[in-house]
Image (cartoon, rainbow, N blue to C red):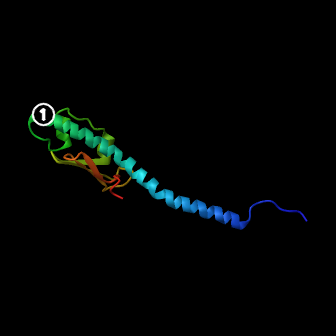
Amino acid sequence: RKKQSGFTMIEIMVVVVIVAILAVIALPTYLDYVKSSYASESRTIISNINNASKMYYQTKGEWPGDVDALETEGQLDLSVSSKLKWTYELSLPDQITATSTEEMSGGAGHVVIYNANTGKFSGYGSPDNN
């Protein structure tokens, strides 16, 4: 009688179960990285807005009301794609808020908040916002 080589059904099922378990463990971590990468653009721009706002305040003696005021004064230059993906609300000197639009790959309505008093970000893509 000739012996057949290959894997048994049990061996294949064990491998499939192991792969499934690894996928279940890895997927939430991957999704957190994706959120963080989507939010990183807004965090970078918020930092630029914060710095430009400080220069605006030094020059004008008042905080800017919106991003357009910073751009008009030449303190900030945002790309069109960034403006399409995120809207920015300035509540200076305390807070800057970014809200995603439909153009952002992660979807609309995600909020990133920068607390200027503590220098910390919260909201979408932050470790504290799972």
Residue depicted at x 48% and y 57%: 27
* Percent position of residue 65, x then y: 14, 44
Above or below, 7 against 51 in this view is below
Rendered-image quadrant of the N terminus: bottom right
Question: Of all residues shown, which one is farthest toward the bottom?
Answer: 10
Question: Of all residues shown, which one is farthest toward the left?
Answer: 61
* Percent position of residue 22, x then y: 55, 59
* Percent position of residue 41, x then y: 34, 43
For the image, the number of numbered tags is: 1
Question: Of all residues shown, which one is farthest toward the front?
Answer: 118
Residue depicted at x 32% and y 47%: 85
Specify whether residue 75 is in view: yes
Drawn side of residue 8 relative to residue 92, left or right = right
Above or below, 49 against 103 in this view is above
Mark 1 surroundings within 10 Å by alpha-carbon count, few (fewer than 14), some (14 through 19), many (20 or more)? few
| Residue that carries the numbered disc 1 in the rendered image | 58
Q: Nearer the viewer, residue 3 or 53?
A: 3
Q: Amino acid at mark 1?
A: Gln
The secondary structure type at the circle numbered 1 is: helix
Above or below, 20 against 100 in this view is below
Give the image quarter of residue 68: top left
* Percent position of residue 71, x then y: 20, 36
Give the image quarter of residue 64: top left
Give the image quarter of residue 48: top left
Residue depicted at x 17% and y 37%: 54
Rendered-image quadrant of the C terminus: bottom left
